Image: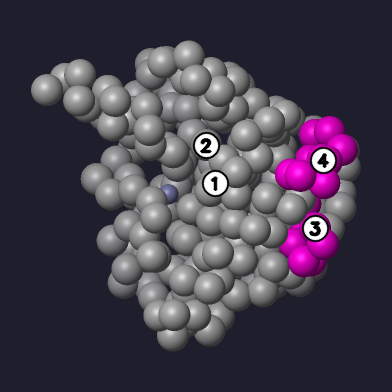
C-alpha cells in the first residue's frame, strides 16, 4: 500500500497553493499604486531569487524570469493557459480568460530531480499547512508551481531546460486556482488547499 502511495505522489505535480494562508492579498489601492513592482517584490521574498528578465509571451502573458526564457518555455506557458481557458469556457466561465491577465514568474529550480530520480524542476516552499502531511520533506515541500497572487493573477514555476510539456501542465494547473478564484469561489475554496486532498486537473 505504501508503495502505491509513493508511485501516486511521484506522478503528481505537487502544487503549493499557499496563497490562502501564506500571503496577504494586495489591496486594490496597492495594486494601482505599485503595479507589477509589488508582485515582483513578493516573488523575490518567496523564492529568494532575483527576476532580472521581463518579457511577454506570444499570446500576451507577462513573464519575469531569473534567466532569459527560451521560446519553447514561452510557448509552453501559452499552450497550458490556452487549454485551461478552453476548459473554463466549456463550463461557462468568463472572467480572467485572457493570457494578458496573467503574470508568471520563472524561478530557479531548488531541485531538478524528484525522489525517484525523474527530471522534475521544482521550487522549495515553507511547508505551512503541508507540515506533517505526505508532502512534508522536513519543514518544506517541493512544488512544481505556486500561486503568488489571486488578484492580479500570478503564479511561480521553476525553470526547465527540457520537458517543456511539463511547463504547459504546471501553467494550466496553477492557472486553474486563479480561474476558479475569479469564476467559481465555492469550487475555488474546495480545491485550493491540496493538503486536504485533491489535485489537478480540476477543470476537464
Ligand atoms: Zn494546485
Q: Earlier in the sequence, mark 3 or mark 2?
A: 3
Task: Check disc 2 and report its element: helix, strand or loop.
Answer: loop
> Looking at mark 3, is its residue's CB closer than 8 Å to ligand 1?
no
Q: Is residue 40 left or right of residue 15?
A: right
Q: Would residue 10 be found to the left or right of residue 113 on screen?
A: left
Point out the tag, 4 or 3, that comes first from the N-terminus. Answer: 3
Is 187 magenta? The answer is no
- Look at the image and say whether residue 66 sits in the magenta stretch: yes
Which region is colored magenta?
57-73
Relative to residue 140, is residue 150 depicted above or below?
A: below
Q: Mark 3 — residue?
A: 57
Residue 37 percent location from the top left of the image: 80, 53
Residue position for label 4: 69
Q: Marks 1 and 4, Cα distance to the nearest angstrom?
A: 16 Å
Q: Are marks 4 and 3 in contact (CB under 8 Å)?
A: no
Q: Which class describes the residues within 10 Å of circle 4: few (<14), some (14-19), or many (20+)?
A: some
Residue beneath disc 2: 144
Q: CA distance from mark 3 to mark 2?
A: 20 Å
Residue 170: mark in rendering: 1
Residue sitting nearer the eye, 1 or 32:
1
> Which is more N-terminal, label 4 or label 1?
4
Amino acid at each position: 500500500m505504501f508503495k502505491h502511495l509513493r508511485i501516486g505522489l511521484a506522478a503528481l505535480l505537487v502544487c503549493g497553493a499557499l496563497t490562502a494562508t501564506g500571503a496577504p492579498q494586495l489591496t486594490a489601492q496597492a495594486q494601482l499604486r505599485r503595479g507589477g513592482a509589488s508582485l515582483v517584490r513578493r516573488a523575490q521574498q518567496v523564492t529568494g531569487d532575483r527576476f532580472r528578465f521581463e518579457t511577454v509571451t506570444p499570446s500576451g502573458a507577462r513573464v519575469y524570469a531569473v534567466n532569459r526564457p527560451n521560446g519553447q518555455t514561452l510557448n509552453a506557458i501559452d499552450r497550458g493557459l490556452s487549454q485551461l481557458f478552453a476548459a473554463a469556457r466549456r463550463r461557462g466561465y468568463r472572467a480572467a480568460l485572457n493570457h494578458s491577465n496573467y503574470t508568471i514568474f520563472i524561478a530557479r529550480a531548488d531541485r531538478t530531480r524528484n525522489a525517484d530520480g525523474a527530471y522534475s524542476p521544482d521550487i522549495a516552499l515553507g511547508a505551512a499547512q503541508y507540515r506533517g502531511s505526505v508532502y512534508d520533506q522536513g519543514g518544506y515541500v517541493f512544488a512544481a508551481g505556486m500561486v503568488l497572487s489571486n488578484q492580479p493573477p500570478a503564479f511561480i514555476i521553476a525553470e526547465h531546460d527540457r520537458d517543456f510539456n511539463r511547463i504547459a501542465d504546471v501553467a494550466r494547473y496553477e492557472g486553474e486556482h486563479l480561474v476558479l478564484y475569479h469564476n467559481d469561489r465555492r469550487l475555488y475554496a474546495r480545491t485550493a488547499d491540496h493538503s486536504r486532498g485533491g489535485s489537478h486537473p480540476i477543470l476537464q
